[in-house]
Amino acid sequence: QVLLLESGGGSVQTGGSLRLSCKFAGFPKDSWSTGWFRQAPGKEREGVAAIDSDGRIRYADSVKDRFTISRDSATNTVYLQMNNLKPEDTAMYLCAADRTTMGAVEYLRLRPSIEGDWGRGTQVTVSS
């Protein structure tokens, strides 16, 4: 079981920045993928950014050129730097990490609909 703890959310105005962190424990040593997902009230969970064990990265079109996902293998932490935030980015942000053969592209697309292990999330609110 992978334990996940997200942090870094908050309230900002349009154009602001936040950096989310997801620290995980019990992470597999072999093939894996991890990523950030979000769910706004009344909407389905969607993929934001994913990174796999080969270092491949995938972003949702809506966040390209604004968000950056990165990982620190030494501390088992995955980050999401969010710049130029917009009101439509308002959501609960959750991270996930799995031992999987899915690369970043598939993981970003398919993981939202898989139960698995999820962190509790961190709320991001962007006001206009």
Image (cartoon, grey):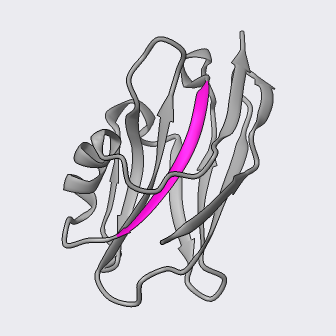
Establish if 127 lies above or below 25.
above
Nearest the viewer among 76 and 70 is 76
Nearest the viewer among 8 and 64 is 8
**Residue 112 position within the rendered picture, expressed as x and y whole percent measured from the top left:** 34, 41
**Residue 42 position within the rendered picture, expressed as x and y whole percent measured from the top left:** 47, 11
| Residue at the (52%, 45%) spot, across then down | 67
- Residue 104 in the magenta stretch? The answer is no
Magenta-highlighted stretch: main secondary structure? strand
**Residue 82 position within the rendered picture, expressed as x and y whole percent measured from the top left:** 62, 43
Nearest the viewer among 46 and 82 is 46
| Residue at the (50%, 35%) spot, across then down | 38
Left or right: 94, with 6 as reference point: left
**Residue 9 position within the rendered picture, expressed as x and y whole percent measured from the top left:** 74, 40
Q: Please state the extent of the stretch shown in magenta in the rendering.
A: 91-98
Establish if 19 lies above or below 62.
below
Left or right: 10, with 57 as reference point: right
Left or right: 31, with 45 as reference point: left
- Residue 97 in the magenta stretch? The answer is yes
**In this figure, what is the number of numbered marks?**
0
Quadrant location of the C terminus? Answer: top right
| Residue at the (54%, 15%) spot, across then down | 41
Left or right: 57, with 23 as reference point: left
